Image (tube, helix red, strand yellow):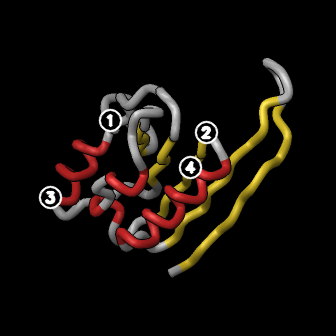
Amino acid sequence: MRGQDKIIEMRKNHLVPEIVFLNDFECDTDWFEKNDHATVSLSNKDVPQMLDLRFLVGLTVSISGSTEKRAKDLFEMAKKAGARTVAACHSIPVNQYRAEAGWGEIWHG
């Protein structure tokens, strides 16, 4: 998991990001330098049940899962960690340019 360190640093300074994007794929995590939305990148080696997601306490979280199972697992783990609102989804790639809707759910704590 990459990208959470700046969120933790913000939290220690009593600041919170508007939203955290938890992406279950490799992506850029230089959001802080670009003044962008907080983005955390997971790799396929990260086990959702083993992640320390306490930095999500009280936050709004958007999860994009690489598989339906991982999306659901991350959704449950974010809720368990104390996130305020969690929206999670999984899309099914059709080709390089298109994806179909898969599973999705929104939870407000």
Q: Where is residue 87, by image quadrant?
A: bottom right
Relative to 83, say whether 53 is above or below: above
| Amino acid beneath label 4 | Arg
Q: Secondary structure at mark 3?
A: loop
| Amino acid beneath label 2 | Ser
Name the disc covering residue 13, or none: 3
Q: Which residue is mark 1?
A: 2
Q: CA distance from mark 1 to mark 4?
A: 17 Å
| Amino acid beneath label 1 | Arg
Q: Tell which tag, 3 or 2, sits nearer the viewer.
A: 2
Reading the chain from its start, which is encountered first: label 4 or label 3?
Answer: 3
Q: CA distance from mark 3 to mark 1?
A: 20 Å
At which x and y percent is residue 72? Answer: 59, 59
Q: CA distance from mark 4 to mark 3?
A: 31 Å
Reading the chain from its start, which is encountered first: label 1 or label 4?
Answer: 1
Relative to 35, say whether 60 is above or below: below
Reading the chain from its start, which is encountered first: label 3 or label 1?
Answer: 1
Query: Given contact means CB atoms under 8 Å apart, are the residues at marks 3 and 2 in contact?
Result: no
Q: Residue at x 43, y 41 (%)?
A: 39
Q: Which residue is mark 2?
A: 66
Q: Tell which tag, 3 or 1, sits nearer the viewer.
A: 1
Query: Given contact means CB atoms under 8 Å apart, are the residues at marks 2 and 4 in contact?
Result: yes
Q: Where is residue 106, by image quadrant?
A: bottom right
At which x and y percent is residue 50? Answer: 33, 53
Q: Which residue is mark 4?
A: 70
**Label 1 neighbourhood size at 10 Å, few (<14), some (14-19), many (20+)?**
some
